[in-house]
Image (cartoon, rainbow, N blue to C red):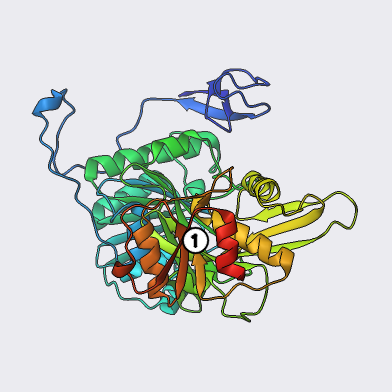
Amino acid sequence: MAKIKSAFFCQNCGYETPKWLGKCPSCGEWNTFVEELVEKQLPQVIAFSTSSGRTAKAQVLQEIVSNGQRRIILPDSEINRVLGGGLVPGSLILFGGEPGIGKSTLLLQLAVQTTLRVLYVSGEESEQQIKMRADRIGQKNDSCFILTETNIQNIFKQAEETTPELLIVDSIQTLFSSQIESAPGSISQIRECTAQLLRYSKMTEIPVFLIGHITKEGSLAGPKVLEHMVDAVLQFEGDQHHVYRILRGVKNRFGSTNELGIYEMNGTGLRMVENPSEILISTGDSGLSGVAIAATLEGLRPLLIEVQALVSTAAYGTPQRSSTGFDLRRLNMLLAVMEKRCGFKLGAKDVFLNITGGIRVDDPAIDLAVVAAVLSSNADIAINRSICCSAEVGLSGEIRPVNRIDQRIREAEKLGFEKIIISKYNKGIEQSNFKIELIPCARIDEVLKALFA
């Protein structure tokens, strides 16, 4: 009989210790240790085989032949973009999001619409529930297998029989291994099941999607070591009261983490939004003050977003500064620049800033739009909706250039804008190359003349 003992695991990093500790020696967090039952026994042979049958052997770096990175192109162009151009064979991808946001719907939609042979494993729903959702989405894949199982050994046996080209697990918190005595969802179970799935994906070169739960703080449930084990971490964000969802790459070993995917939730699943600017720019009344349009970039994708500002007199003596989707410290810096360099007295006024569409923008190119929206609200003068901005604002009040300005200009031109305000110091930008009118400015006072003259 195997010897059973208990150990304490850190919920943040997975550090193991035989006794309870108040502070984790590995990550420094307090009160994160929980007790788990651990069964020490010889590891069982996992029920899957490898096509190559290779064994690990040390090789000289110069002798390794690089055959490039093969990608599996999925029918979902947004997932392809966020992953860096497609799915890499043998990759393990963790897919996280809040409950009810649409994680299972998106991956089931991927499973039934791709031409790959897919094994969809669900530990949370029955076959009938999955079938109802697949019928609503519109089933097209005749090689999509559904398995409702939580035992990791049984899952590998079914994978051996069905020989899938893509494995989807919903969710990793429901799986358990008979080698571990603790309950499903515990730290040791999550770590062990993920390690076995990682070994499976690397040995068979079958990509695996894992759906993960989200804690109250908004982070992925389970130890942080889980995020280090996987090849990519995708975060599915959005508000349940709105129809738009945003897919971000938090970690990606095969591509950039700056890419963004946008979906619209409807009755038949999630629709890919090819032109994100259609949801980020409102089509309301053009005579409202405090609204400016900015041309920004998310990875390789140019976007036009709407910046809204509200400036009012402080009712209680202490002015408020509030920002949604934009760094509050950068907003305070821009307000100080406007007061010091341009003479606008905003120190005794409340300033509220909002980036529409529910996205968060870190691109400094929207600085000029933030300044324009704040000054428009302060003077209660509307900005012409045919004008957009794309430039950074420095501490001395100068308009600084931003990278890849030509892509931003062409996106604004494609969406029908007539003028765009850019930095005077952008090199190699000629008016003859664009149909949209370019307004180069060097200082904020020149921007004011172009906007409110």
Dot 1: within a 10 Å radius of its alpha carbon, few (fewer than 14), some, or many (20 or more) residues? some
Q: Say whether residue 310 is visible.
A: yes
Q: Residue at x 40, y 47 (%)?
A: 257
Q: Quadrant of residue 422?
A: bottom left
Residue 426, position as x, y percentages in the image:
39, 53
Q: Quadrant of residue 217?
A: top right
Residue 223, position as x, y percentages in the image:
53, 35
Front residue of 139/321: it is: 321
Residue 272, position as x, y percentages in the image:
41, 70
Amino acid type of the residue that numbered disc 1 sits on in the rendered structure: Ile
Front residue of 144/97: it is: 97
Q: Say whether residue 216 is visible.
A: no
Q: Residue at x 24, y 67 (%)?
A: 115
Q: Tell me if residue 159 comes above or below residue 245 in the rendering.
A: above
Is 331 on the left or on the right of 154, as rendered? right
Residue 364, position as x, y percentages in the image:
51, 50
Front residue of 88/66: it is: 66
Q: Residue at x 30, y 76 (%)?
A: 140
Is 332 on the left or on the right of 254, as rendered? right
| Residue farthest toward the right in the current orientation of the protein | 316
Q: Is disc 1 placed on a helix, strand or loop?
A: strand
Quadrant where the N terminus is found in the figure: top left
Residue at the disc numbered 1: 246
Q: Quadrant of residue 354?
A: bottom right
Quadrant where the C terminus is found in the figure: bottom right
How many numbered marks have been drawn onto this rendered protein structure? 1
